[in-house]
Image (spheres, coloured by chain):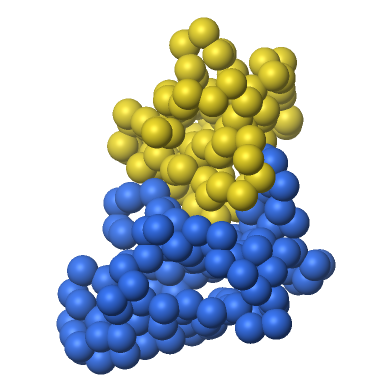
Chain colours: A blue, B yellow
């Protein structure tokens, strides 16, 4: 079974530029999560989708971050404009949903903002 | 609010030693789930184990074992006879019973196993 796919693996941009990350979840997984992992920290949720609807985006800096999950499958996370403090690994995870569901993670995108 | 504390930032052991990673959690929920994930240098978080709050039976799986104690709000993880391939960052995580909540992670413990 294919895992969660993310691209690109690495991205280096200048501050104030824009960037987009892509995620393809495990087939059949209704719930998709984007987490931000700053160096030396555990992942923190940015946004959670159930099918193509947003369940929780309370931690998403909406002035610069946006995300969508068209057709309830693939998802894109965008940052515009990027700041230095956005340097982090952006992890996508998916699950079937439900209480105590196991989340399966992609390899992440490592973003460096210079 | 939910919180997970992993007090050990880094641990180094010599190959074949046993090592225990500590995890203490806080939650007001009576039903919740606890997880351990492994993050090797490749970056992908790999699921290791899940426990619900009603199942305090400790488990052994190969070289891995877990000790869940509700009385002390702890969910510790032990690797027996450690190997170099065990070197990674290990995260403890918590979620509630609503079914639509994300994982709350600790800061992780970096384990280095030296040959």
Asked if one can make out residue A19 in the rendered structure from this viewpoint, the answer is yes
Give the image location of residue A80, x and y in percent: 30, 86
Q: Residue at x 65, y 74 (%)?
A: A52
Residue A11 in view, yes or no = no
In this rendering, position of residue B38 left or right of residue A88? right
Judge whether B115 appears above or below B44 on screen: above
Q: Nearer the viewer, residue B108 or A15?
A: A15
Quick one: quadrant of the N terminus of chain A?
bottom right
**x and y, in percent, of residue A4 in the image:** 65, 69
Q: Residue at x 31, y 68 (%)?
A: A61
Which quadrant would residue B98 be assigned to in this image? Answer: top right
Q: Find residue B17 and report its horizontal and vertical position in percent.
A: 50, 26
Q: In the rendered view of the protein, which quadrant contains the C terminus of chain A?
A: bottom left
| Position of residue B85 measured from the top left corner of the image (x, y, whole percent) | 55, 48
Q: Is residue A80 left or right of residue A83?
A: right
User: Image quarter for residue B9?
Assistant: top left
Q: Could you tell me which residue is drawn at 63 percent across and 83 percent down?
A: A70
Please report the residue visible at 72 percent of the width from the left and 47 percent of the height from the top.
A98
Asked if residue B36 is positioned above or below residue A76 in the image, the reply reads above
Q: Nearer the viewer, residue B96 or B84?
A: B96
């Amino acid at each position: 079974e294919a895992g969660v796919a993310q691209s690109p693996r690495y991205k280096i941009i200048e501050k104030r530029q824009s960037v987009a990350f892509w995620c393809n979840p495990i087939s059949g997984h209704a719930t998709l999560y984007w987490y931000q992992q700053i160096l030396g920290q555990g992942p923190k949720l940015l946004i959670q989708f159930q099918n193509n609807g947003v369940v929780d985006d309370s931690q998403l800096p909406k002035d610069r971050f946006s995300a969508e999950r068209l057709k309830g499958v693939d998802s894109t996370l965008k940052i515009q404009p990027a700041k230095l403090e956005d340097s982090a690994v952006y992890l996508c995870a998916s699950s079937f949903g439900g209480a105590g569901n196991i989340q399966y993670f992609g390899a992440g995108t490592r973003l460096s903002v210079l | 609010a939910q919180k997970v504390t992993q007090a050990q930032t880094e641990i180094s052991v010599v190959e074949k030693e046993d090592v225990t990673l500590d995890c203490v959690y806080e939650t007001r929920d009576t039903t919740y789930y606890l997880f351990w994930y492994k993050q090797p240098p490749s970056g992908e978080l790999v699921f290791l184990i899940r426990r619900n709050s009603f199942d305090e039976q400790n488990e052994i799986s190969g070289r891995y074992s877990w000790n869940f104690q509700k009385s002390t709000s702890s969910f510790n993880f032990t690797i027996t006879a450690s190997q170099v391939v065990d070197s990674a960052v290990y995260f403890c995580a918590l979620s509630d019973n609503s079914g639509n909540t994300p994982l709350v992670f600790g800061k992780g413990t970096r384990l280095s196993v030296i040959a």
